Amino acid sequence: MTTSAPRRKRTGKFQAEVSQVLKLVINSLYSNKEIFLRELLSNASDALEKLRFKSLTDAQLMGGDERLEVRLDADLEARRLVITDTGIGMTKEELIEQLGTIAHSGTKAFLERLESADDEAQKAELIGQFGVGFYSAFLVADRVDVISRGAGADESWMWSSTADDTWTITPLKELTERGTAVVLHLKEGMDSYLNDWTLRQLVKNYSEFVPFPIKMRQPPSEDEEERAWERVNEAEAIWRRSKSEVEDEEYRKFFTHLDPMAGEPMTWTHFRIEGGQQFTGLLYLPEQAPAGMQFVQQQSRVRLYVKRVFIMDEVDALVPAWLRFVSGVIESDDLPLNVSRELLQDSAIVRAIKGQVEKKVLDALAKQKSDDLEAYTNFWSACGTVLKEGIHHSWKHRERIAGLALFATTQGDEPTDLDAYLERMGEDQEAIYYITGESAGALAASPHVEGLIAAGHEVLLLTDPIDEWVVDSLTEYKGKTLRNASAGELKLDDEAEALREEQNLAFSALQERITEVLGDRIGSVRVSERLTDSPVCLVVPEGSVNARMERLLRSHGQAVPSAKRIFEINPSHPTITNLQSLAQREEAPGALGDWVELLYDQALLTEGSAIQDPAAFARRMSRLLEQATQAELA
C-alpha cells in the first residue's frame, strides 16, 4: 500500500532574473498603472480559452460546470480586489513553474503545442506572449495571492508573494471551484481601483471585446440584500465576422459605439489580410470633421487590439497623421510589441500593416467619389485639408491623393478634380494653372488670372494654407506641370513676343519713372501679358516664395526675406496710357509719383499683402481725390 506525499506549505525563492524583472515591472516597465487590469483579464481569458479548447476532446474537464466567465469583486473595507475565472486553473507544479519563472509563459508553450493542429477553427485564441503580464499586479498591490484548482484536479493551492525575493505556496483545506482567483491586497493610494465606476470604465476601455463574460456586482440597491452579478463587456467584435454576415445598420451602430459624438459614417472598409502578416481591420470615414481633427498631435481614432484586447490608440506607426480623421479598429496577432505592450517596434510587419491601411482607405475614398460625388464633396469640405497633407508627406501616394482632391475653379461654381481639369484642357495648354490666396471669390477676380481666363484657360483657386505645401510637393500631375498664375512670365502667346518688345519700348518713360519712385521695393518693371482689365499687378520671380507663403511662414515665427516683385503694367489700360503720356512730358507733374505709389499699394492689396504705410496711403488718396474733383469743377 502506497501513500501520497503529505501536502505541505513550501517557501521558494524567485530565480535571479525573476527578481530583477519584478523590480523592472514595478518601477519602469509600465508607464500606466491601470494596465494591470488589462493584463490580468487577458490571463483570465487565456485560461478560459484553454479550457474551452481542451474540453472539446475531454468533456470531463468541465466537471459539470459549464460556466466560462470572469468576475471582478472589490472589497472596500479589506482594500482587496479579486479577479476570478472559471478557466483551466493550475496545479501546484504549474503555479510554481509559471509564477516563479519569468517569461516561461504557459500560453507560449500552449501555442507551440497547437502549431500542428489541423483544424484552424479549433486553434485557441490566446493573448499573453511574454509571461510577465501577471507581475503587473504588483504595480498596485503590495501582496498578491493566487488561489487555483486545475480542471480535473482534486486539490486547491494558494501561491503568495510580496514582490520580494521569495514566494510561498500553501495547500488549502477546502476545495475551491475550478479556475483561478487573483487576490490583490492594494497599496496605499490605490483605492481608486476599488471604485465600481473606475473598474467598469477600465473593463470597457481594455477588455470590452473579450469573448467571455466579465461580470461585476450590480450597484447597491436599498431593496436588495444581495447584489446580483451582471455582465459589463457587452460589445461584440464585429470586425471578426465575415463582411457578408454584418448588416449596414450593425456597422453604423459600431461606429457610434466607437465615438458617440462622431455622427454618421460616410462609408467604411472591412478587410482581412492574410499571408506573411495576418490582421483584420474595420475603418470608418466620417461624414463630418471629428473633434480636434485640425491638431496634428490629436490622439489616433484607430484602436489597436491583439486578440480582442485593447493595446493602444496611439498608433501613428500604423496610421499616418494625414489620415487622422479615420476611426476604427485594427487587430493583429503578429505585431512585435514590447513586453509592456505599450510601444510598437519599427519592423517590416508594422510597415506592411501601415501600407495596407493607407491603401484600403484610399480605395474606399476613390469608390465613394465614384459612387456618390455629392456625399464625397461634403466629406472633402470637412476633411479634405487633412487628407491633402498626404500629398506633402507621402511620396508613394501623392499623385493618388492629388487625384482625390477637389478644388474651386474659375470654370463654374462646383469644385473640380485634376482629372476633370485635364479633360477640359485645350491641346495647346501645357500646364495646370493655379493661384493661392484667402478666398475663391477674391482669387477669381485677381488681376493675375485675367489673361489666362481671356485665353480660355481654367485656373484652380487654392485657399487652404496647406495648399502652399501641396503645390510645392506636387510639381506635376500625370505629366502636366503645375504653374502658379502669379509667378514668372506666362507667355500665353509666343507669336506676340515681338509686340511685347515694342510695348516695352513704347512705355519706357513710364517704366523709368516707376523704377525711380519705387526704388528697391521692386525688382523690375515690365509690360504684362497676364493683365486685361486691371492696370497693374505684382508678380513673383520664377522660383521665389510667393506673397502668401511669406505671410504663412512669418505667422509661424520664421524670418523670410521678401522677394522683390516684378511690377507689371497693362499697356491697354487707360490709366497706364495716361500716365505714360504724363511721363513723356519734359517736366512730368509731381502728382505722377503719387499715382505710381497708389498703383503700387493697389497691387499689394490685390496680392493679399498689407500696405506698408496706411496713413501715407490715406493722405495720398485724399490729395488725389481733391485734385480730381477740382479738375471736374474747372
Image: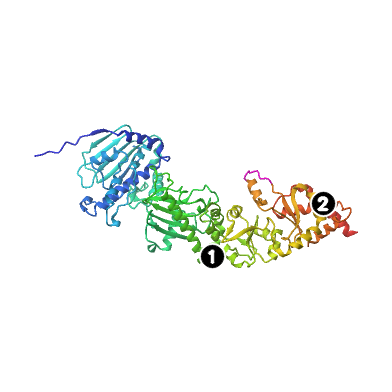
Q: Is residue 544 magenta?
A: no
- The residue carrying mark 1 is 373
Quarter placement of the N terminus: top left
Q: Earlier in the sequence, mark 2 or mark 1?
A: 1
* The quarter of the displayed image where residue 168 is located: top left
The amino acid type found where label 2 is placed reads Asp
Direction right: furthest residue: 634
The amino acid type found where label 1 is placed reads Leu
Q: Residue 153 placed where, x, y %? A: 20, 45
Q: In the rendered view, would you say 615 is above or below 79?
A: below
- Local secondary structure at mark 2: helix
Closest to the camera, between mark 2 and mark 1, is 2
Q: Is residue 67 left or right of residue 595?
A: left
The span picked out in magenta is: 556-561
Q: Residue 347 placed where, x, y %? A: 42, 47
Toward the viewer: 427 or 210? Answer: 427
- The residue carrying mark 2 is 594
On the question of residue 567 being in view, the answer is yes
Toward the viewer: 216 or 527? Answer: 527
Measure the C-alpha gap from mark 2 to mark 1.
52 Å
